[in-house]
Amino acid sequence: ERAFKLFPWAKDVESIAFPPRGIEVRLAYNEPAAVVQVGTAQKVVLDRRGVVLPAEDLDPAKLGRTILINGKGIVAPAANRVGLVWKTETPDRPELAQVDRYVVQAAKLAGFLLEPHRQRDAESSPVLRILAIISADPMNERWLFVQNPEGVLILWGEAPGDETLEQPSAEEKWRILVDEAKAKAIEPQPRPG
């Protein structure tokens, strides 16, 4: 079982059977949820848990829907992170690599937004089709914003499951967005200038 979990696409081993001629293994796979823009050139594919997926295995034409993650201060993941949760490191102290909480939170949010029933909601209104998650750093307190095709930025806050008791859950936030979209209350704002 352990050997199968070392494969970067394997999320979990669901079952192993030993029929008379061979072995049958049922795996659950990591599914791409987000593409992180690092700088101007590098793009890193993540699953909904923030696990770095091997980009060389992906055919962009067959990738399916993912959500772009970007933001000021996102640093490329530590070396050799394929199949593991995103960590960042400083070049002079690689042994101090730490999980980048904000990238992982954004990946969790991307996975939440791409769940089938939310995708069906998003098909009903472009306001609900989230294209990007922006990790912003207003005065050192990271926040997640979501952006739709119309360029509307919506403050999301914390990732699903990371909310405080005072904050609405991710499901409650989604319901609010759906209600606002139905009421046509979310509209693009004119750009200054």
Image (spheres, grey):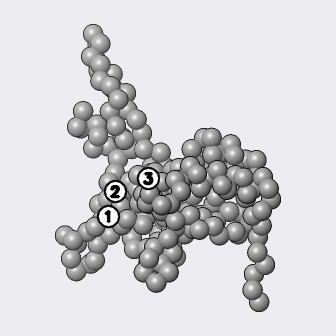
Judged from the image, the secondary structure of the residue bearing numbered disc 2 is loop
Residue occupied by mark 1: 99
Task: Classify residue 176 as left or right of residue 75.
Answer: right
Residue reaching furthest to the top: 20
Mark 1 near mark 2, Cβ–Cβ under 8 Å? yes
Given the image, on which type of amino acid does mark 1 rest? Val
Indicate whether 8 appears above or below 18.
Answer: below
* Rendered-image quadrant of the N terminus: top left
Residue shown at the point (72%, 52%) measured from the top left? 179
Judged from the image, the secondary structure of the residue bearing numbered disc 1 is strand
The answer to whether residue 126 is visible is no
Residue 116 sits in which quadrant? top right
Front residue of this view, candidates 122 and 41: 122
Judged from the image, the secondary structure of the residue bearing numbered disc 3 is loop
Q: CA distance from mark 1 to mark 2?
A: 7 Å
Given the image, on which type of amino acid does mark 2 rest? Val
Q: Please name which of the two marks, 2 or 3, marks the residue nearer to the observer.
A: 3
Indicate whether 156 appears above or below 170.
Answer: below
Residue occupied by mark 2: 85
Residue occupied by mark 3: 161
Q: CA distance from mark 2 to mark 3?
A: 17 Å
Local packing at callout 2 (Cα closer than 10 Å; few below 14, some 14-19, many 20+) is many
Task: Classify residue 134 as left or right of residue 178.
Answer: left
Counting labels gives 3
Residue shown at the point (76%, 75%) measured from the top left? 189
Front residue of this view, candidates 13 and 62: 13
Query: Which circle marks residue 125 in the picture?
Result: none
